[in-house]
Image (spheres, helix red, strand yellow):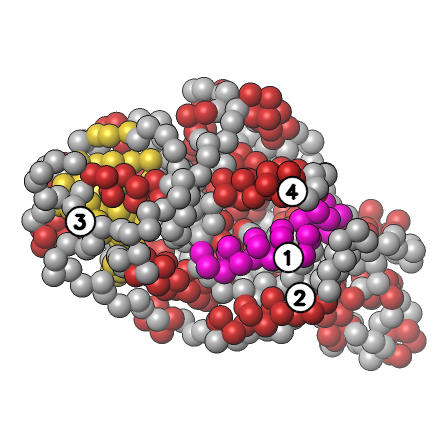
Amino acid sequence: MSGTAGTAICLLRCDLRAHDNQVGAPRVSVGPAPLVGRVRRDSPASRPAALTARSVFLQVLHWAQHNADFVIPLYCFDPRHYLGTHCYRLPKTGPHRLRFLLESVRDLRETLKKKGSTLVVRKGKPEDVVCDLITQLGSVTAVVFHEEATQEELDVEKGLCQVCRQHGVKIQTFWGSTLYHRDDLPFRPIDRLPDVYTHFRKGLESGAKVRPTLRMADQLKPLAPGLEEGSIPTMEDFGQKDPVDDPRTAFPCSGGETQALMRLQYYFWDTNLVASYKETRNGLVGMDYSTKFAPWLALGCISPRYIYEQIQKYERERTANESTYWVLFELLWRDYFRFVALKYGRRIFSLRGLQSKDIPWKKDLQLFSCWQEGKTGVPFVDANMRELSATGFMSNRGRQNVASFLTKDLGLDWRMGAEWFEYLLVDYDVCSNYGNWLYSAGIGNDPRDNRKFNMIKQGLDYDGNGDYVRLWVPELQGIKGADIHTPWALSSAALSQAGVTLGETYPQPVVTAPEWSRHIHRRPRRTVRSTCRGSRKRPTSLSKCQQWTAACQRRRN
């Protein structure tokens, strides 16, 4: 480091954590052109998702620690994140995600204070805030951040480059939001990325390596003298109310790195639930049918590389099986959608999708409202949509089904569903969200033509006794067993006995697909486990699940 005192601003966007400083030679530039050298300028008009991979922050902070006397970790609440979505002007950031973000920001500030620093928080566009800080301090020598993949984020980066160029300040950028580093892909340039996930996965597994994580310094450089940390805004500052906690939620956790690491400890080491993940991952009820890492990954509160290293350790010390592999399989899907965004740019937001298909999508707002509110008259769809509205969370199985229903059964514009998910999901990630919706709509990376989910078969396969539907559609609780999935097929006497009047207490179905009839009155298969139980070899006490849930609630309260 030079003898001249300098200040580095570490702008955080998708990296709200203090662990895993990614290894790799950083890219240095003093102007804007090289900054986006490997990111397409025509990348998508992204939805400013709240934050994404934890390994980046440490890389950013690590560089600043070694190249400046004063380091300013900075998070900006960008007002553009709280406006309307691009196509249908739905709210961009809903109450569940906003609360999770605020919790994550508070948690990171607490962590940094323990290391002699703090998180500087401002409300405003990052490029404006950085410009003001450069002018105010007069000692800023570098602005450091990690690169993103989609247009709105790239526009911020372009603005930052312009500001830094005007003030003669260095720009230092990194790539770190994925398990596999962009520069380590066997598909280069990015235009060679396979359009089928399986080809992508096999290419990585046969040759690429995951870079190791790095530890954070025990003591951090201080802020520049006289700089105030700023207050963290409240829900009310954004015109939103704190969402009511629903006891039925499958995700009662709060935001932040602390909770993310606690969840991994619990799911891997305390309960061995990871060893049965593949068996339970299609569950619907309870916290422990899946890892639930996605919300923290989306905000960068946990690093995908840290999860990878913990899987490796678990396989060495406990067991290696299909389930432990499948956690990495899912992380690779997350990588894939981010690299697809790099390859296709704005096209991931296009009505015609990646395949440039002309599909006569409908824009029926009444049908869309039925889907939004969970009042389609199809119980399995309605249960999932009501869970999403009440909690900000929905299982992966549920997401696939409600997306298929909107696009294939209702024929509605897939972007209506994508923007509704953007608003509500606590784990919203722009690349994964739009990648998955393109896939469901049949205009993305699905190698099968016209894949369509059968709502009745899916309900019977994954909620055979109807317990999930009863949890979220209480007006149907009087219907016993699997019949709850097809109330319109029941006799008037059966409906009367159950206290159900179609069209009054519960809607008539807005659509019925011909293929559903094959599964009416079918005996359901054994439903996947979806509670707090572990496998036979790895018994998990219910008390541990209860203790974890109580700890999450205490943390939030």
Residue type, numbered disc 2? Lys
Mark pair 3, 2: CA separation: 44 Å
* Mark 4 surroundings within 10 Å by alpha-carbon count, few (fewer than 14), some (14 through 19), many (20 or more): few
Kind of element beneath mark 4 = helix
Q: Which residues are magenta?
A: 257-281
Image position of 346 (left or right of 460): left
Residue 213: quarter of image? top left
Of pointers 1 and 2, the one earlier in the residue sequence: 1
Q: Main secondary structure of the magenta part?
A: helix
- Look at the numbered discs 2 and 4 and tell me whether their residues touch, using CB distance below 8 Å: no
* Mark 3 surroundings within 10 Å by alpha-carbon count, few (fewer than 14), some (14 through 19), many (20 or more): many
**Residue at the disc numbered 3:** 70
Mark pair 4, 1: CA separation: 13 Å
Residue 31 - label: none
Residue type, numbered disc 3? Phe
Residue type, numbered disc 4? Glu
**Closer mark to the observer between disc 3 and disc 4:** 4
Residue 310, position as x, y percentages in the image: 56, 44
Kind of element beneath mark 1 = helix
Of pointers 3 and 1, the one earlier in the residue sequence: 3
**Residue at the disc numbered 4:** 317
**Residue at the disc numbered 1:** 270
Residue 259, position as x, y percentages in the image: 50, 60
Residue at 87% x, 70% y: name it. Answer: 480
**Closer mark to the observer between disc 3 and disc 1:** 1
Against 144, residue 221 (above or below) is: below
**Residue at the disc numbered 2:** 544
**Closer mark to the observer between disc 4 and disc 1:** 4
Residue at 73% x, 64% y: name it. Answer: 541
